[in-house]
Image (spheres, rainbow, N blue to C red):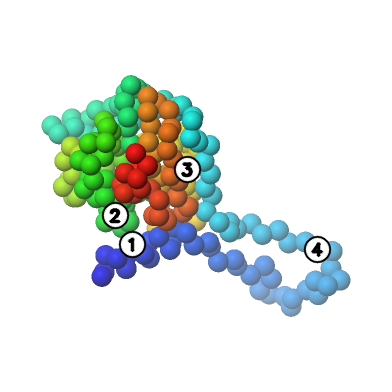
Amino acid sequence: MAAATASLAFSRLLSSAPKPASILPTNRRPLNLRHSSIKYKHKYSTTPKISATISVGDKLPDATLSYFDSDGELQTTTISDLTKSKKSILFAVPGAFTPTCSQKHLPGFVEKSGELKAKGVDTIACVSVNDAFVMKAWKADLKVGDEVLLLSDGNGDFTRAIGCELDLSDKPIGLGVRSRRYAMLVEDGVVKVLNLEEGGAFTSSGAEDMLKAL
């Protein structure tokens, strides 16, 4: 129950808009705006800053991602290596160790990895704008084996290249700019299925959704 409550609270936090502050001066009486020509411009954000430029039919841009192998050695791979002449699933999470990502999104792909690979998927990889050390610790914490490759897009280069950055700078938990949640099926570098989420939602990017798409 506590885990479910934390997951719900986190999703609401990612999706919520900041509360507008008063625009009236605190040391003066309110102006009569009916006869005033003064126009006030709101400076605050009302929605999460999300966008996406990648779409079905597009070839993925190449980028370098990092991870620690089973021997604890730091390795790098590229989007081209992951997808060339292969059928791959790439899914992204807003952050390692965050509730929905840890309790549902990543575990779902680990659990269904056998079924996905039985349907011809060669590689399943999770991408996050976290450093490789955090991804290594997250993998160990969830006891993930070789079912899913956990990849660090530490500087957000790949995430920005496909237009899936999620600006959470106005949230009070220090996430900054992360990745929008998504899952995509890629064949020989070309996007065949793309399920993008809004904010912290988790409605269409799970392993079950990708199984249905295969």
* Cα gap from disc 4 to disc 2, whole angstroms: 50 Å
* Cα gap from disc 3 to disc 2, whole angstroms: 21 Å
The residue tagged 1 is: 7
Q: Say what amino acid the circle numbered 4 marks.
A: Ile
* Cα gap from disc 2 to disc 1, whole angstroms: 9 Å
Total numbered badges shown on the rendered structure: 4
Q: Secondary structure at mark 2?
A: helix
Q: Residue 142, relative to residue 65: is it above or below?
A: below
Q: Between disc 4 and disc 3, whose residue precedes? A: 4
Of discs 3 and 2, which sits in the foreground?
A: 2
Question: Which class describes the residues within 10 Å of circle 4: few (<14), some (14-19), or many (20+)?
Answer: few
Q: Say what amino acid the circle numbered 1 marks.
A: Ser
Residue 129: x percent and y percent?
37, 41
Residue 115 or residue 153, whichever sits in front: 115
Which residue appears at 28% of the width and 33% of the height?
Answer: 121
Residue 88: x percent and y percent?
32, 32
Q: Between disc 3 and disc 2, whose residue precedes? A: 2
Question: Which class describes the residues within 10 Å of circle 1: few (<14), some (14-19), or many (20+)?
Answer: many
The residue tagged 3 is: 165
* Cα gap from disc 4 to disc 3, whole angstroms: 36 Å
Of discs 4 and 2, which sits in the foreground?
A: 2
Of discs 2 and 1, which sits in the foreground?
A: 2
Q: Are marks 4 and 1 in contact (CB under 8 Å)?
A: no
